[in-house]
Amino acid sequence: MQDILDAIMAAEGATEPAKELAAVAGLPVPESYRGVVVRADEVDMFDGMATREKDPRKSLHVLQVPTPELGPGEALVAVMASAINYNTVWTSIFEPVSTFSFLKKYGKLSELTRRHDLPHHIVGSDAAGVVLRVGAGVTKWKPGDEVVAHCLSVELEDPAGHDDTLLDPQQRIWGFETNFGGLAEIAVVKSNQLMPKPAHLSWEEAASPGLVNSTAYRQLVSHHGAAMKQGDVVLIWGASGGLGGYATQLALHGGAIPICVVSSPEKAELCRQMGAELVIDRTEFTFWKDEQAQDTGEWRRFGARIRELTGGEDPDIVFEHPGRETFGASVYVAKRGGTIVTCASTSGFMHQFDNRYLWMNVKRIIGSHFANYREAWEANRLIALGRIHPTVSRTYPLEQTGQAAYDVHRNAHQGKVGVRCLAPVDGLGVRDRALRERHEPAINRFRGH
Ligand SMILES: NC(=O)c1ccc[n+]([C@@H]2O[C@H](COP(=O)([O-])OP(=O)(O)OC[C@H]3O[C@@H](n4cnc5c(N)ncnc54)[C@H](OP(=O)(O)O)[C@@H]3O)[C@@H](O)[C@H]2O)c1
């Protein structure tokens, strides 16, 4: 592994980095590597505990794991950096189900997918690094290419996935529903997960937008989502968080008017620094009277606050992911004919809303999940062009991934939390310094928060 890292590090400051990186083609692939795993023999470790007490630091381990055989259409990537996504939090607390059930099911699909059904699950759904090897049939990528990986894994043997790959019956999220994820020194991906690494970003910056930026792009911008247009009022929950930090930027960049909902003055300030003018502190509202009943008076008060900020307008789009706690309010405040687009249920998946507000006002609820390759590519292109910026607030070394996931689980983070896998320090891998200089303050906006 050290030889591979040395070859990648030789590209730092080199006049022709690609030449240095091409050397990885001649280096042997290590037989094993370090990866962050949950273990099948520990899935019961948090039984009986409340969700918030389940501690990812106890369940996420760094293990030396065997390098899997490379299949057709796949690539082995030396991972310089990855990032924490909420799905790793779910995996690490074994909620709502243990991810070993996904690996078992995937393992039954074919001789090749059987590799994934192991007693350890190497997690992580983001990566930036260098291609080490490509499998049979791969022509678009070669060893030495600097890449980021998106997390849509599809088989596409079924016609259902050929209009929109999200509809493939064998659609999975890499590193969550498959093994060999990005929180490791080496990752196995399908070659159609690969995209060019944005040249003006460091490894940890390039690794951090992938999952959340692509998800927010499909939710807000794509015709599969809310198809946002100029001037739309967009209510964004968790607007300085993983998804929300990109939803806010995409709304601003697309000429929409974001209303950012956050839970602290510091988070409100980050939204303002991104360029948002309308911000609401959600701690001023209590949408539930008790476990069973919502306070419709609070929905109204929330709606009135939105109108106060917009000069009387309701949201054309509500960007939903908190789920149970906010969904009733989201359906209530959306404009007549408006769209609630949801990709998650962090606070609980059994939602309650007053359906009269939905049908009488012809609102729509759209379910959205990650993004197809094209949407992920377009989202990454916006990053590469310097139109949308990373939101890395801090990074941890691979050994402290448990702590990184713990921060996200407790909602004690801002934006994205990065993880250095092979990268020894932050800031490496920048190839286009001129583009970086133009956007440096925006790239660093979340750092240290
Ligand atoms: N389907 C998909 O493809 C997909 C993709 C990405 C993420 N997700 C899911 O989406 C959810 C959010 O992911 P993320 O990466 O954005 O996580 P994150 O970084 O933790 O950000 C979520 C934000 O939501 C806000 N929030 C948390 N609990 C809330 C509540 N009860 N009511 C209102 N706001 C609340 C928090 O902001 P404030 O405290 O400032 O309000 C937090 O910063 C997770 O459940 C994740 O698994 C799904």
Image (cartoon, rainbow, N blue to C red):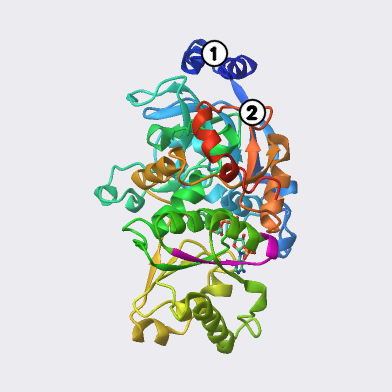
Distance (Cα) linking label 1 and label 2:
19 Å
**Residue 289, x across and y down, in percent:** 65, 85
Look at the image and give the residue range highlighted in magenta: 257-266
The one nearer the camera, 363 or 441, is 441
| Residue at the (49%, 33%) spot, across then down | 435
Q: Position of residue 87 (x, y in %)?
A: 57, 52
Tell me which label, 1 or 2, sits earlier in the chain. 1
Counting from the top left corner in percent of width and height, residue 8 is at 57, 19
* Disc 1 residue type (three-letter): Pro
The residue where tag 2 is placed is 423
Q: Is residue 95 visible?
A: no
In depth, the one of 162 and 424 nearer the eye is 424
- For residue 254, which quarter of the picture? bottom left
In the image as oriented, which residue stretches furthest toward the bottom? 297
Residue 258 is a magenta residue: yes
Q: Residue furthest top?
A: 26
Label 1 crowd (10 A; few <14 / some 14-19 / many >=20): few
Side of 230 relative to 175 (left or right):
left
Percent x, y of residue 139: 32, 24
Residue 376 relative to residue 303: left or right: left
Which quarter of the image is occupied by the N terminus? top right
Amino acid on which disc 2 is placed: Ala
Q: Which mark is residue 28?
A: 1
How dense is the environment of label 2, judged by Cα within 10 Å: few (below 14), some, or many (20 and up)?
many
The answer to whether the residue bearing label 1 lies less than 8 angstroms from the nearest atom of ligand 1 is no
